[in-house]
Amino acid sequence: MQSNQLKLTFCGGVGQVTGANFLLESDSVKILIDCGLLQGVATANAWNSAPFVYNPADINILFVTHAHLDHVGRIAKLVKDGFKGVIYSTGDTKSLAALIMEDAFSIMKREMARDGRDPMYDMVDVEKARELWKIIPYHTHTSIPGGLSVYFRDAGHILGSAMIEFTYGKKKIVFTGDLGNSPTPLLQDTETITDADYLVMESVYGDRNHEPVNERKEKLEKLIKESVSRGGALVIPAFSIERTQVILYEINSLVESGKVPSVPVFVDSPLAIKVTDIYKTATEHFNSGVQAEIRGGDDIFNFPRLQFTVNREASEAIDRVPNPKIILAGAGMSNGGRITHHEMRYLPDPKSTVLFVGYQSAGTLGREIQSGVKSIKLFGTQVPVRATTDTIYGYSSHKDSDHLVEFVSSTKDSVKKVFVVMGETKSALFLVQRLRDYLGVNAIHPELNESVVLDF
């Protein structure tokens, strides 16, 4: 490469929502952006366990956009395979990632022991990753080797999420990570990008739109009332980071305003409980309306009849609490965790409701239930689906198609290429075409492991 060029390789996160992993390199420095787990597809275990397509020992720096498992889930494997460089993220991402990686190791260890396979890494590799991890705050210019500088902007996706902007010479390449569905109930809006020369962006909802934001809370209120009136359980598979906290905040508001009856509400996820504790200490990143509520004395993650169930005994005791009740549990795509036990109990109950409030990847149990099947297989047993199933897309932490286009429109006059990644192929290609047609930008959906040379 020439001195005014960088090479970008799409090592993951192409053709799939998950597995984000991008390599940016010059002649003197090799930089990774995210190192995530592939989830929800039959080939996930093989891909996750396979050697990296680059030598981890050659990587100088890893930047992490945010703490979801599909962005941090292979960092410990990267360390085990030889990475000794520096890891950078925001402070909240570092705190959340520590919880996510420890939780993921526990799950992986159980699953691989069950399947007679060796773990991809050990807890010592998780600890080494923590030791290599450093913090860059939002809105701070930081020089890094190779003549580049880096700058973090708030992505508004989850607590600590960042768009990572690299400047090389006089040009910029921005990696969006996942972009928040602004305005969100809790967080500040996604910041605007106006001067990117190259953009690597997500496309989870590139081919569809959410309900209007003013309708999501109304629909939640309606579903809670209907479930209570039927005398059933409202079971919500919820991601531990952001989605659980958002739904708690919304229920808190509905209960305190008297819009829904006060019924037992259970947060049945040790990880979500730990994450909520971090959210309670990071209120400076909440939007102005929520900050005003907190200053006014509202404990936004606490209300009458709310219970956090940490141990297994408390989780199992939820079944003995009479309906109606609300249960939030992980995993958010019903691909493991405590939620599957609750689904086995309540999916056959016509009085109950299973409510999805997040993206369900192809191949996951959540996507299968969401599609309207009449029965599913859980723990080796065929379980009939008689409960009401519904989805509120407006609580997604991702921008929808219209807002992804709107996001790019702010930088359309400067951007030379937009690389559309981190979405199912049909979603990414749909967004590519929309960006070309509506904005006239050079949008591309790259191939897995494809490399492109960018002029700077």
Image (cartoon, rainbow, N blue to C red):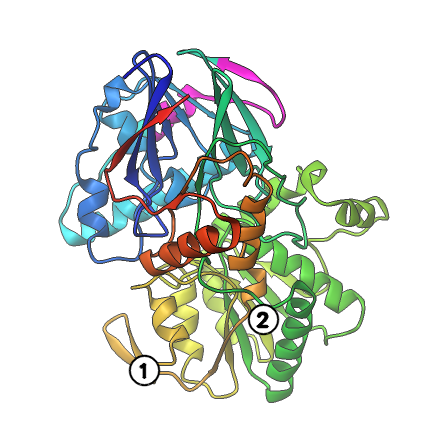
Callout 1: few (<14), some (14-19), or many (20+) C-alpha neighbours within 10 Å?
some
Along the viewing direction, whichever of 29 and 282 lies nearer the viewer: 29
Residue found 63% across the figure and 84% down from its top: 226
The residue under the point 68% across, 62% down is 250
Residue range in magenta is 126-143
Q: Nearer the viewer, residue 432 or 322?
A: 432
Residue 189, picture quadrant: top right
| For residue 247, above or below residue 179 | below
Question: Which residue type carries mark 1?
Answer: Ser
- Expressed as whole percent of the image width and height from the top left, the position of residue 201 reads 45, 43
Mark 1 or mark 2, which is nearer to you? 1
Q: Residue furthest right?
A: 296
Residue 137 belongs to magenta span: yes
- Left or right of residue 394, residue 53 in this image: left
Give the SS element for disc 1: strand
Residue designated by label 2: 326
Residue 405: where, in percent of width, then height?
A: 53, 52
Relative to 381, residue 448 above or below: above
Q: Which residue is mark 1?
A: 375
Quarter containing the N terminus: top left
Q: Count numbered badges in the picture.
A: 2
